[in-house]
Image (cartoon, grey):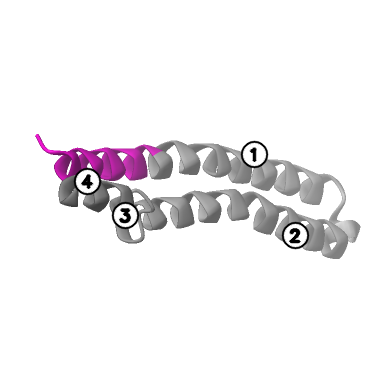
Amino acid sequence: MDITAFIAVASIVTAGITIGLGSIGPALGEGRALASALTALAQQPDAAATITRTLFVGLAMVESTAIYCFVVSMILIFANPFWNYALAQVAG
Protein backbone atom coordinates (compact mmCIF):
# COMPACT_ATOMS: atom_id res chain seq x y z
CA MET A 1 0.00 0.00 0.00
CA ASP A 2 1.49 3.31 -1.02
CA ILE A 3 1.43 6.40 1.16
CA THR A 4 -1.49 8.09 -0.62
CA ALA A 5 -3.73 5.07 -0.15
CA PHE A 6 -2.68 4.81 3.49
CA ILE A 7 -3.50 8.48 4.13
CA ALA A 8 -6.86 8.10 2.35
CA VAL A 9 -7.81 5.05 4.43
CA ALA A 10 -6.60 6.62 7.68
CA SER A 11 -8.53 9.83 6.94
CA ILE A 12 -11.77 8.01 6.20
CA VAL A 13 -11.50 5.77 9.27
CA THR A 14 -10.62 8.72 11.50
CA ALA A 15 -13.52 10.75 10.11
CA GLY A 16 -15.90 7.88 10.84
CA ILE A 17 -14.64 7.46 14.39
CA THR A 18 -14.83 11.24 14.92
CA ILE A 19 -18.47 11.37 13.85
CA GLY A 20 -19.38 8.20 15.74
CA LEU A 21 -17.83 9.09 19.07
CA GLY A 22 -18.40 12.81 18.69
CA SER A 23 -22.14 12.41 18.37
CA ILE A 24 -22.67 9.98 21.24
CA GLY A 25 -21.83 12.47 23.99
CA PRO A 26 -23.99 15.34 22.71
CA ALA A 27 -26.90 12.96 22.08
CA LEU A 28 -26.75 11.66 25.65
CA GLY A 29 -26.34 15.17 27.01
CA GLU A 30 -29.29 16.52 25.05
CA GLY A 31 -31.48 13.65 26.20
CA ARG A 32 -30.53 14.22 29.82
CA ALA A 33 -31.10 17.99 29.53
CA LEU A 34 -34.50 17.47 27.94
CA ALA A 35 -35.53 14.98 30.63
CA SER A 36 -34.48 17.40 33.36
CA ALA A 37 -36.30 20.28 31.68
CA LEU A 38 -39.49 18.25 31.37
CA THR A 39 -39.25 17.29 35.04
CA ALA A 40 -38.76 20.96 35.98
CA LEU A 41 -41.71 21.99 33.79
CA ALA A 42 -43.91 19.37 35.43
CA GLN A 43 -42.97 20.62 38.90
CA GLN A 44 -43.10 24.37 38.16
CA PRO A 45 -45.35 25.18 35.19
CA ASP A 46 -45.22 28.91 36.01
CA ALA A 47 -41.50 29.03 35.13
CA ALA A 48 -42.03 27.51 31.69
CA ALA A 49 -40.65 30.48 29.75
CA THR A 50 -37.43 30.65 31.77
CA ILE A 51 -36.89 26.90 31.70
CA THR A 52 -37.54 26.67 27.96
CA ARG A 53 -35.23 29.57 27.14
CA THR A 54 -32.44 28.12 29.27
CA LEU A 55 -33.02 24.68 27.73
CA PHE A 56 -32.65 25.99 24.19
CA VAL A 57 -29.45 27.87 25.01
CA GLY A 58 -28.02 24.77 26.68
CA LEU A 59 -29.02 22.52 23.78
CA ALA A 60 -27.33 24.88 21.33
CA MET A 61 -24.12 24.74 23.35
CA VAL A 62 -24.22 20.95 23.58
CA GLU A 63 -24.98 20.61 19.86
CA SER A 64 -21.97 22.75 18.98
CA THR A 65 -19.71 19.88 20.09
CA ALA A 66 -21.29 17.56 17.53
CA ILE A 67 -21.00 20.26 14.87
CA TYR A 68 -17.28 20.67 15.62
CA CYS A 69 -16.80 16.91 15.20
CA PHE A 70 -18.65 17.07 11.89
CA VAL A 71 -16.43 19.92 10.70
CA VAL A 72 -13.27 18.01 11.66
CA SER A 73 -14.44 14.93 9.79
CA MET A 74 -15.28 16.97 6.68
CA ILE A 75 -11.82 18.56 6.80
CA LEU A 76 -10.23 15.12 7.04
CA ILE A 77 -12.18 13.86 4.05
CA PHE A 78 -12.23 16.87 1.69
CA ALA A 79 -9.44 19.25 2.74
CA ASN A 80 -6.93 16.90 4.32
CA PRO A 81 -3.75 18.75 5.30
CA PHE A 82 -1.71 15.56 4.94
CA TRP A 83 -2.26 15.31 1.17
CA ASN A 84 0.49 17.86 0.48
CA TYR A 85 2.89 15.71 2.50
CA ALA A 86 1.82 12.59 0.65
CA LEU A 87 2.18 14.21 -2.77
CA ALA A 88 5.64 15.50 -1.83
CA GLN A 89 6.69 11.99 -0.80
CA VAL A 90 5.42 10.48 -4.03
CA ALA A 91 7.02 13.18 -6.21
CA GLY A 92 10.33 13.17 -4.39
Q: Which residue is mark 2?
A: 57
Earlier in the chain: of badge 3 and badge 2, it is 2
Q: Identify the disc placed on residue 8.
A: 4
Q: Identify the disc placed on residue 32.
A: 1
Q: Identify the disc placed on residue 24.
A: none
Residues shaded magenta: 1-17
Earlier in the chain: of badge 2 and badge 1, it is 1
Q: Would residue 17 be found to the left or right of residue 70 on screen?
A: left
Quick one: 46 or 36, which is closer to the camera? 36
Q: CA distance from mark 1 to mark 4?
A: 37 Å
Quick one: 77 or 59, which is closer to the camera? 77
What amino acid does circle 3 point to?
A: Asn
Q: Position of residue 51 (x, y in %)?
A: 82, 56
Quick one: 25 or 72, which is closer to the camera? 72
Q: CA distance from mark 3 to mark 4?
A: 12 Å
Earlier in the chain: of badge 4 and badge 2, it is 4
Q: CA distance from mark 3 to mark 2?
A: 40 Å
What amino acid does circle 4 point to?
A: Ala
Q: Which residue is mark 3?
A: 84
Earlier in the chain: of badge 3 and badge 4, it is 4
Mark 4 crowdedness (10 Å alpha carbons): few <14, some 14-19, many ≥20: some
Query: Residue at the location (44% across, 36% down)?
Result: 21
Mark 3 crowdedness (10 Å alpha carbons): few <14, some 14-19, many ≥20: few
